[in-house]
Image: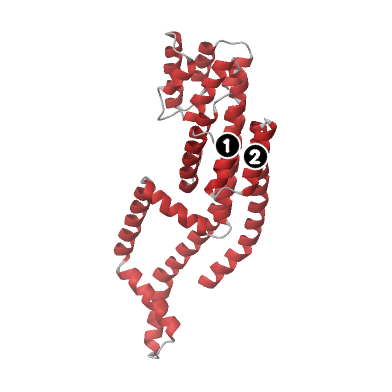
């Protein structure tokens, strides 16, 4: 919206007024008014944005600052909008691949639990009347049913405590690193998460460099948008190597975890002086690849999950 309204010739202050009326989210609308008031007092747009780091990320602030410095704010905002849209699209595809099996398995667990609570006890009474020794598998099912019926409160408390501990761990650096480390070891899904982060790395870094942001600041901002802790740490280390004068491709190669494809393409971009566009091409390549992989995974998972649910029942 900023890009479109500014391209129509309106002043930035007027644009922010219009946005505050159009945006339905109350907090964001109020933020537009506050930024508008800051600009009225002579504050630069990027400086006004920088006052609200809890809402506005470094990617937005640094890109706007580069656009102000180069007199290309409209073009920079358009590039930023495209970047955010592609980021959201890629992450949504990856989440879709994760959510589908989670939903199906959750429904299966709920269905089996309902059977154990309401159906099995009635069958148990019938077996007791027969007075015969039940097969081992049947005894296991009956035992599970009795346990759930008698100790449902204990199971509920355990689940709630587990959810709390996982959520708390995700807020800690060590916890995030542990859980994402487990994620990377899951076949297919770990590889898909890696490719998603590589797409984000290439897209954001390319957009920032193309907007005129320096390489060191671009790496710092790119580091903040990546999800996998192992890559966040390596990008921070790469930034230190680039500070000492090492080329970006050499610094990435030394990490031993960045794909050769990314390193080779960055090396080509450095030699040709067209690094930002080269990174954009890398991001588009990963986006297409993720889309293809998700189609394959969902096609395979659908009959496989139906089989798993059938076996559980």
Q: Position of residue 257 (x, y in %)?
A: 54, 50
- Marks 1 and 2, how far apart in space? 9 Å
Viewer-side residue, 69 vs 166: 69
Viewer-side residue, 22 vs 120: 22
> In this orientation, does residue 92 appear?
no
Viewer-side residue, 286 vs 95: 286
> Residue reaching furthest right?
272
CB atoms of marks 1 and 2 within 8 Å: yes
Q: Quadrant of residue 84?
A: top right
Viewer-side residue, 25 vs 267: 267
Q: Position of residue 11 (x, y in %)?
A: 55, 10
Q: In this rendering, is residue 47 above or below 267?
A: above
In the picture, the disc for residue 247 is 1
Q: In this rendering, is residue 204 above or below 94?
A: above
- Residue 195 in the figure: left or right of residue 149: right
Q: In this rendering, is residue 210 above or below 106?
A: above
Of the image marks 1 and 2, the number of the one nearer the N terminus: 1
Q: Quadrant of residue 31?
A: top left
- Residue 272 in the figure: left or right of residue 173: right
> In this orientation, does residue 157 appear?
yes
- Residue 249 in the figure: left or right of residue 230: right
In the picture, the disc for residue 138 is none
Q: Position of residue 7 (x, y in %)?
A: 63, 16
> Residue reaching furthest top?
41
Q: Secondary structure at mark 2?
A: helix
Q: Residue at x 39, y 69 (%)?
A: 117
Q: Position of residue 148 (x, y in %)?
A: 35, 69
Q: Residue at x 55, y 48 (%)?
A: 95
Q: Secondary structure at mark 1?
A: loop
Quadrant location, the N terminus: top right
* Colour logic: secondary structure
**Mark 2 lies on residue:** 267
């Amino acid at each position: 919206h900023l890009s479109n309204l500014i391209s129509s010739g309106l002043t930035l202050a007027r644009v922010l007024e219009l946005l505050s009326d159009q945006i339905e989210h109350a907090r964001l609308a109020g933020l537009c008014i506050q930024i508008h008031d800051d600009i009225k007092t002579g504050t630069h747009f990027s400086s006004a944005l920088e006052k609200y780091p809890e809402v506005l990320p470094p990617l937005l602030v640094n890109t706007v600052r580069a656009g102000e410095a180069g007199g290309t704010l409209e073009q920079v905002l358009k590039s930023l909008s495209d970047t955010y849209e592609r980021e959201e699209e890629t992450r949504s595809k990856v989440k879709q691949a994760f959510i589908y099996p989670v939903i199906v398995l959750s429904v299966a667990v709920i269905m089996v639990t309902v059977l154990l609570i309401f159906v099995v006890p009635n069958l148990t009474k019938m077996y007791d009347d027969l007075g015969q020794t039940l097969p081992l598998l049947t005894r296991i099912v009956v035992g599970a049913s009795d346990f759930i019926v008698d100790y449902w409160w204990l199971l509920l408390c355990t689940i709630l405590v587990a959810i709390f501990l996982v959520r708390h761990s995700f807020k800690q650096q060590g916890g995030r690193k542990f859980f994402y480390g487990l994620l990377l070891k899951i076949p297919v899904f770990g590889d898909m998460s890696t490719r998603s982060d590589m797409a984000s790395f290439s897209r954001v870094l390319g957009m920032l460099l193309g907007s005129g942001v320096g390489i060191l600041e671009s790496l710092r901002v790119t580091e903040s948008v990546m999800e996998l802790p192992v890559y966040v740490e390596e990008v921070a280390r790469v930034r230190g190597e680039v500070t000492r004068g090492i080329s970006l491709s050499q610094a990435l190669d030394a990490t031993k975890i960045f794909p050769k494809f990314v390193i080779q393409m960055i090396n080509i971009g450095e030699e040709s002086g067209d690094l930002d566009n080269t990174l954009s091409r890398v991001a588009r390549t990963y986006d297409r690849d993720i889309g293809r992989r998700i189609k394959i995974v969902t096609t395979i998972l659908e009959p496989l999950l139906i089989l798993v649910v059938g076996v559980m029942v």
